[in-house]
Image (cartoon, grey):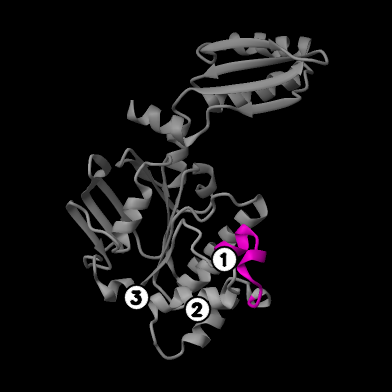
Amino acid sequence: MPIIQIEEASKQYGEVVAISRFNMSVKGGSITGFVGPNGAGKTTTIRVVTGLTKPDSGSVSVFGENPFDNVGIKERIGYVSEHDDLYPWATVRESVKMLAQISMPRQPGLIDAIDRAIEEVGMTKFAERKVSALSKGMKQRTKIAAALTHAPSLLVLDEPLSGLDPLGRRRIMDLLRRLNREKQVTILISSHVLEELEHLASRITLIHRGQTIAEGDPDRIRKLLYQYPHEILFKSLAEDTKRIASGLVEIKGLVKSLTFMEQSDELLECRIVTPQPELFYDELVRLAVERKAPIIQLDTLSESVERLFEFLVS
């Protein structure tokens, strides 16, 4: 039985439909990515999973039970909110204690549990540092420590990678992998950036306008991404750009549209829309090598979760 099972769940706030007939399944021991544009319904779904609200219709099961107002289920869940709910004047240890007391009010062993959780996230040497002096990544690790104090079986994180620099993002991802591998903690993590989670999660659920758009392993989701037209930009010396572009347009069905834009320093930019991005990259490299035309810059302009979802919905 899945640890989380959501079937046909809907939730409305006044005239705003947050989720509509939404479905999602999370297996025990997995890291599941939950991806969608801002406003897609991710936070509402997480609030339903953690028992903070209940759907207007449909069913939600966590560990085989309804999580709403269910103390026994909440004790098995560690929740990391998207909000900055740390007090700047408090130390790391004080912050973890305040948040942990929500899950472990007056329970024996709380202090030892706090110290273990702080060590677990690699924050022991910063335990007496004030929150106001922490980086965003360190704040996130402090919040994760608070969620781990009661040794949860399920860790639910709402946009924990948002706004982090590459080093901070890598540290959080390494921490989550280790918790999943060594502690067998099931993890549900949300993001609005697909690329953040495809190398972390074993399964990804896509949500758009409150509805499930697709579910599957990262390879399947990546294949969906490659099914919609990509806009790709490359830049070289003017003659090199033209030689590469002429070879690309000769390949049947590869180029949907092509635009040149003159740049400074004798450079020429070429923007191409292609319905076959995987083949396009292979041919681009082949032509650049064969025609001795070095590419100075290469960017993908359309690989965003918003464009993917618009394509899938259409």
Task: Please tell me which residue is depicted at 39% across the width and 87% down the height of the picture.
Answer: 106
Task: Find numbered disc 2 in the image and state the secondary structure of the residue it sits on.
Answer: helix
Tell me whether the residue at label 3 lies in contact with that at label 2, contact meaning CB atoms closer than 8 angstroms.
no
Q: Which mark is residue 141?
A: 1
Q: Is residue 130 magenta?
A: yes
Residue matched to label 2: 97
Where residue 52 appears, x then y in whole percent? 30, 62
Query: The residue tagged with tag 1: helix, strand or loop?
Result: helix
Spatial CA distance of label 1 from label 3 is 20 Å
Asked if labels 1 and 2 touch by Cβ distance under 8 angstroms, the answer is no
Q: Residues within 10 Å of mark 1 (few under 14, many from 20)?
A: many
The answer to whether 30 is drawn above or below residue 208 in the figure is below
Instruction: Tell me the number on the disc at residue 75.
Output: 3
Tag of residue 19: none
Q: In the visual, does 102 lie left or right of 127? A: left
Residue interval drawn in magenta: 127-141
Disc 2 residue type (three-letter) = Lys
Location of residue 215 by image quarter: top left
Residue 130 % position (x, y): 64, 71
Amino acid type for the residue under numbered disc 1: Arg
Mark 3 vs mark 2, CA separation in Å: 16 Å
Label 2: few (<14), some or many (≥20) within 10 Å?
A: many
Q: Residues within 10 Å of mark 3 (few under 14, many from 20)?
A: some
